[in-house]
Image (tube, helix red, strand yellow):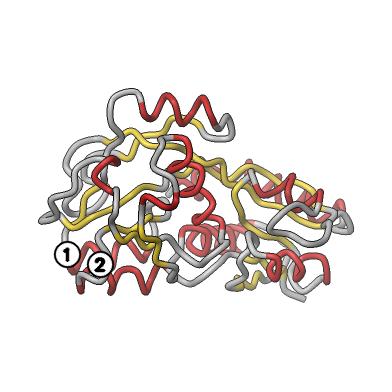
Amino acid sequence: MAIRIGANIVGSTYNEQGRALKRMIEEKSDLGPVEVLTTDLTSPGGMAQLEAGAIDMGLTASNWVPRARNGEAPFAARTDIRMVAPVNVGAPFFMVRTDSPLRTFDDLRGRRIAMGPKDGGQHNHVINIVRSLGLGMDGIEPVFIEFDEASDAVLAGAVDAVWQIPVPNRIVTELTARQPMRILDYGPGQLAKLLADYPLYRRAVVPAGAFPGQEPDSEQIGVLNVCITHARASDDLIHGFVSTMVRETGMLAG
């Protein structure tokens, strides 16, 4: 039976990571085939699939692990999660077209921002940021759509900015092939305040040239992404999975 990994929508950061793990496990271990599913582990429905045994592992941000274990919002029930391994630190960011007049975070006041599905993981990051920096959710006009749909929306002018998932991912690659985009930087002291208010984040840098239109390095928040499983997962599966990750780190980096 295939190892089923929940990894969000096709083209997303988690989905790309899930496919990299699939190649690694199938080529470098004897654990068997891997199936990558479009399961969102930041949603109650996605976590319920892990609890029910519909998936064996999942990729998510580390801040959701204690919430899911404790049954805290947005999760209505506890899930007996176990950590498999850290995966990477990803930097989400606010993105605009290169011809946009918006330059910094403060320019987002009153603007239409696509921020992923309502109550999804990325939506909650935006809530943290706007609260910390004094804008608040009433200071922006949130637009709740999936990230692939947000690409069409920003190109059509239906939204002013997109809260974007970490790169590299296919959604950003395809968007910036159609229209160069750039990141909005935080103003003086804003990133430091955000990191102080929310210790779950760390400092990260999106390098210049990460995608067409992004010229300078940009300092952003970093989110620790992890691979999780259920307590019932076998020791042999976890040992085989993690030992392969450690042994084949170079393959994952590529």
Q: Quadrant of the N terminus?
A: bottom right
Instruction: Name the residue at 86% across, 51% down.
Output: 235
Instruction: Check disc 1 and report the residue beneath it.
Output: 179
User: Residue 45: where, in percent of width, then height?
Assistant: 70, 71
Residue at 28%, 72% in the rendered image: 153
Q: Nearer the viewer, mark 2 or mark 1?
A: 2
| Along the line of sight, the residue nearer the viewer: 95 or 7 | 95
Residue 97 got which mark?
none
Query: From mark 2 to mark 1, how far is it between C-alphas?
Result: 10 Å
Mark closer to the chain start, 2 or 1: 2
Q: Is residue 15 above or below residue 67?
A: below
Residue 145: % across, % down: 43, 71
For the residue labelled by badge 1, is the local secondary structure a helix, a strand or a loop? Answer: loop
- Quarter of the image holding residue 29? bottom right
On the picture, is 239 further left or further right than 29?
right
- Give the residue type at disc 2: Val
- Marks 2 and 1 in Cβ contact (< 8 Å): yes
Which image quadrant for residue 35? Answer: bottom right
The residue indicated by pointer 2 is: 154
